[in-house]
Image (tube, coloured by chain):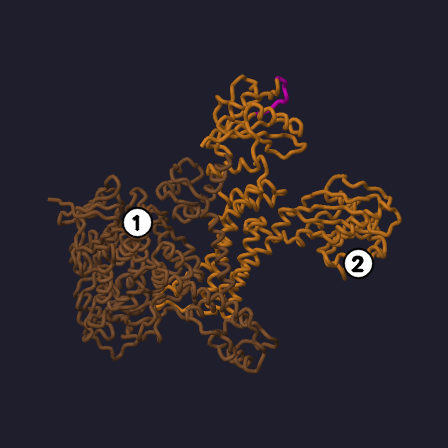
Amino acid sequence: MNYFAGEYDAVVIGAGHAGIEAALAAARLGCKTAVFTINMDAVGNCPCNPSIGGTAKGHLVRELDALGGEMGKTADECFLQSRMLNRGKGPAVHSLRAQIDRRKYSEVMKHKLELQENLELRQAEITDIKKTGDGYELTTQMLAVYRTKTVIIATGTYLGGRIFVGEVSYESGPDGIFPATKLGQSLKELGLPLRRFKTGTPARVLRRSIDFSELEVQEGDDPPEPFSYETRELGDNKVVCHISWTNDATKQIILENIHRSPLYAGKIEGVGPRYCPSFEDKIMRFGDKPRHQLFIEPCGENTEEMYLQGMSSSLPEEVQLKFYHTIRGLENCVIMRPAYAIEYDCVDPTAMLPTLEFKSFEGLYGAGQFNGSSGYEEAAAQGLIAGINAARKVLGKEQIILTRDSSYIGTLIDDLVTKGANEPYRMMTSRSEYRLVLRQDNADERLTPLGHEIGLIGEERYRRFLDKQEQKRAEIKRLKTTVISPTEEVNRILVSRETSEITTGVRLIELMKRPQLDYEALAPVDTQRPELDKNVMEQVQIEIKYEGYIGKQLKQVEQVKKLENKKLPQSFDYREIKGLRLEAQEKLNKIKPLSIGQASRISGVSPADVSVLLIWLASRKGQ
Amino acid sequence: MKEKTIAAISTAQGEGGIGVIRISGEASPQIADRVFKNINGRRLSEMKGYTAAFGKVFFEGEELDEAVALVFRAPHSYTGEDVVELSCHGGVYITKQVLRAVLDAGAVPAEAGEFTKRAFLNGKLDLTEAEAVIDLIGAKNRSAARSAMYVKDGALRKKISGVKDELLSLTAHLSAWADYPEEDIAEVDDRMITETCVSASLKLERLLDSYDVGQAVREGIDTVIAGRPNVGKSTLMNLLSGCEKSIVTDIPGTTRDVVEDTVNLGSVMLRLSDTAGLRDTGDKVEKIGVDRAKKRLEQCGLLLAVFDNSRELDKDDEELLKYSKDVPSIAVINKTDLENKLDINKIKEYINKIVYISAANGEGRDDIIEAVESIAGTNRFDPAEGILSNERQRSNVVNALRAVEEARQALESGFTYDAVTVSLEDAISELLEMTGEKTSEEVLDRVFHNFCVGK
């Protein structure tokens, strides 16, 4: 018998990386919130790589932190080794990545949820969702019925999850946890457009069975940098990673057994990500490449499980063992958990607004892999925005939309709801047209004022942020007014850095502009320099050196804004505009873009269609 | 969307053989019926598309003119709407009266570019086509019209996409290299970037060069005929234009003002100005003419310097030779039917293109054509090649070129590749804008600003 079990402002289905941020945000903004997980020991689980961040993902974590999210702080607390990727390739593409202790991460996150005021963490499978007059009614498999004003679906790979290992296949969530088998049907009945996606993970092997003696070691940064603007002290790196390579023998085994891959045998209907392919995919698609790199990463401090990054596979367990054994260092490795592919239900994200609320269901939000993305960081980013907007819906406040020029988070969400996802969506720096503006070092400058306004950044932290901004302003002013005389010492430094000598007094800022010079080089002659925050120095340096390029991108932002400000009607049948191509009419009717800017990013809406829309909009106004 | 029915005169305003009044919109047949009486009594609103009727146009009860009415039915018309075109006798007065009659019958005056705007909104034209329409309307000779047609057919687009693809594959490599630091993606190095930039710059520069030739084809070349009095300038002008435009007498100083004409010479159009003969003169009126001629000389795109074969070089001739150093020039030696007294070698020191004619006998026109084509570069000009045809396209290419150069400079001064990428992406975006693969409001404004009423 069903029983009434409680009433909430916001209910979050799923306590993965999206669910956690959504639940914390909603609760912190004052909503009575519940978060449901299928398994209490799987809160904040990292079923794939034991690391947080990476190219563009590191940006997302910094932005989350700047807005008041939790991922960055927890990653810092659980960090094992940290590296800033792409040093030397330019500040736009610097990205932080940290190896983390995945069990600890899960435990810390769970504890944070437990301690959070207004938040209840419960173990239950939601099996049914119904729209009621002013909200939703959720039923668990224990027949408990909860009423709520808003719902955030963050089911990850649990929704209709099915695991594939060679010829073997069974219903399952990740890491052997049982899947959500009934909710999918209920969501379909509600009218959500669901489809199947696929992802996969490599095997975990026993550390003692690996021969590290001939493997290349990958050390962390010294000193390592934290994700969170609030983390003061990170401590030293605790582990190293190792690098190895596949070879021709590995390739031969794949080729001999490819018919046993469920993907190539046609058993998996879900679409997998191109950019994070299984190893057999790499072999089949890049057959002429003689070898592929892999990373051997520890899963935690108190475990001997090692993660084989780059070696994801859905081949049979025996084949996995065979091909792993061809790899240097892994000749005798013991598999603790086999690699697998997992197929799951997710939604077509174009059914959502850029607020992550479903267009046809007020108060219903989606986040994370359920929205067609991939990756912990992408999930967390959406979770935060969905949580904020659900809370604001309850509080009767205006919804928040992050623009593409504000953040990678905004870019991610805009891509999802505008272009949709044909494969699990992963964040990349090349997805942002404003890379030099949206840097990982200035995430706080871009987003902390908004985080404060929303209410997730406390007064003390905000004051610290303002102080830092003030320090930055003062420092730029100092550089502009300080004149360096052409002394022998100065010119010795200039020559040693292979840049031209000075003959008259030059303002410090002019020297700083030279690509060859930086704070470190100028220290001996910059005697009046005050004590500066490390991050301030970094930002000042980048802004001075890249001023021209940053200015260019800001100009583009302004131009694009003009199109973003051209609002399109929400109830209009685009078939009435004959000049639009059929495909464009259909796409526009489906997505109902909020502005010409958004319309221009819909795939299937060509520039010619956009021109038609612009002229149509102009002549409409004229009438 | 209910659109009003619009009307305008869609032929050039002036004395022409025929004037066309175009009416477009749902009510156009009914409106036309109110002013046009078919000779066989059949109403235009009952006629099918692609049909014609002969009849008379009435205004306020009076017969205005005879006219042919062409009926087009949506969507098979220029605008994609129902269209009636009334072709009446040309002439400013008549066409204006017919238009007035049509407006009184219920049509509203078309705004600038409105027919094309509607055609565009109804999917009859895309942006680059719309732009080519402007060029086609504006085309003053056959070469220009042909090159406008080729723009429509995408020759230019093909040329641009060569450069674009080159830049795109470089930026794609740069992105992959940045986004996958741990995959063994081939390193990008300075040489690779420089090579691509150099190659792209070269192609863009070549395209820009073609603009001047294209301009010569499209707009014609500002050409000045100059020489001392009575050397035969006006005779030459008439030889080129094929009719008596300049008054020819044997009295020096007959041509006092600048006489202008436009002639098509082979593949190129010359906007000819016949000028007063260069000489020091006491005559006030003539002096103004001479000053004007000198001014023209400094600004022209081509100088036809005329010399008299039967006389020695004098001071005025030498002054003309000095002018010729600063502008593309052809020395035209006239009166070759008379005995040679002219020092040709002296002229050759200044001008290397020399053509001998006898204007009086009508000889030498073909030689002039050849010389003009070779100077304008139009003899090497193949409209099928795809050339830049207007300022908008030119400015996109100039900006793209500048961006590519910036990328190179960034590299040279030691900037990281993310900064270099910003410039490369700028260049790509300019090229996308040019070919219409990217839209910005500015582009639309610029394009539609150019439409004249009627088209």
Q: Which residue is mark 2?
A: B344
Q: Nearer the viewer, residue A15 or A609?
A: A15
Magenta residues span B61-68
**Label 1 secondary element:** helix
Residue A395 visible in the shown view: yes
Query: Label 2's element?
Result: helix
Q: Is residue B383 above or below residue A308?
A: above
Q: Is residue B33 magenta?
A: no
Of the residues shown, which amino acid type is indicated by label 2?
Answer: Ile
Task: Tell me if residue B382 comes above or below residue A216 in the rendering.
Answer: above
Q: Amino acid at mark 1?
A: Ala
Instruction: Quadrant for residue A582, please give it.
Output: top left
Callout 2: few (<14), some (14-19), or many (20+) C-alpha neighbours within 10 Å? some
Position in image of residue B295 (x %, y %): 76, 51
Query: Who is closer to the viewer here, A216 or A520?
Result: A520
What is the number of the mark on residue A271?
none
Write down the residue under mark 1. Answer: A390
The chain holding disc 2 is B
What secondary structure is the magenta-colored segment mainly? strand
Image coordinates of residue A385 in percent, x first then y, are 33, 53
A251 w.r.t. B344: above or below: below
Q: Considering the image in quadrants, where does the N terminus of chain A appear?
A: top left
Q: Colour of chain A?
A: brown
Q: Residue at x 46, y 62 (%)?
A: B421
Q: Chain B is shown in which shade?
A: orange
Q: Is residue A64 left or right of residue B49?
A: left
Magenta includes B67? yes
- From this viewpoint, which residue is outermost toward the left? A1
